[in-house]
Image (tube, grey):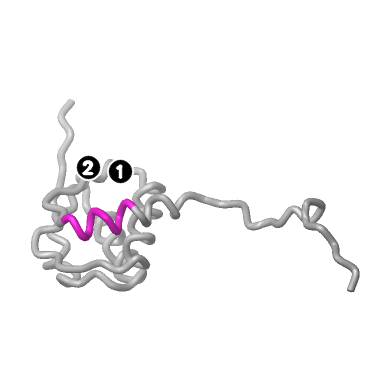
Amino acid sequence: MSTSAKAFIISEILSPDLALRESAARLFVQFEDSKDSAIIVDFKGVKSITRSFAHEYCRRKREYAKRISEMHVPINVRKMMTAASQTSSPRSKSLELDSVPVVVL
């Protein structure tokens, strides 16, 4: 069984400067329209990326059913994706109040 992959050149689809969470979300909508079993995101021509875009991209990639791989990722984009992926894992939002000391004023 062969797997097919489709390449998406992100700078042509969105912009050379990746800034908004909504842009990352739009990108994944385009992935959904693909009938291919794997996605290749080509970062050729990308100049900059914000933490917001990188965070949303990493979060959606983690939850996505198809296999996604990247190519031609500039070093500044790679560094931001690494930083964002370290903070994109689900965290508990609850606070353990029993462990917080109470000070009487």
Q: Does 96 sit above or below residue 53?
A: above
Residue 103 to residue 33: above or below: below
User: Image quarter for residue 30?
Assistant: bottom left
Identify residue type, mark 2: Ala
- Between residue 64 and residue 37, name the one nearer to us: 64
Q: Nearer the viewer, residue 94 or 28?
A: 94
Picture coordinates of residue 16 (x, y %)?
Answer: 15, 70
Quickly name the residue at label 2. Answer: 38
Describe the element under mark 2 as helix, strand or loop: strand
Q: Quadrant of the N terminus?
A: top left
- Residue contact at pointers 1 and 2, CB within 8 angstroms: yes
Dominant secondary structure of the residues highlighted in magenta in the image:
helix
Part of the protein shown in magenta: 75-82
Q: Which residue is mark 1?
A: 66
76 displayed left or right of 53: left
Helix, strand, or loop for circle 1? loop
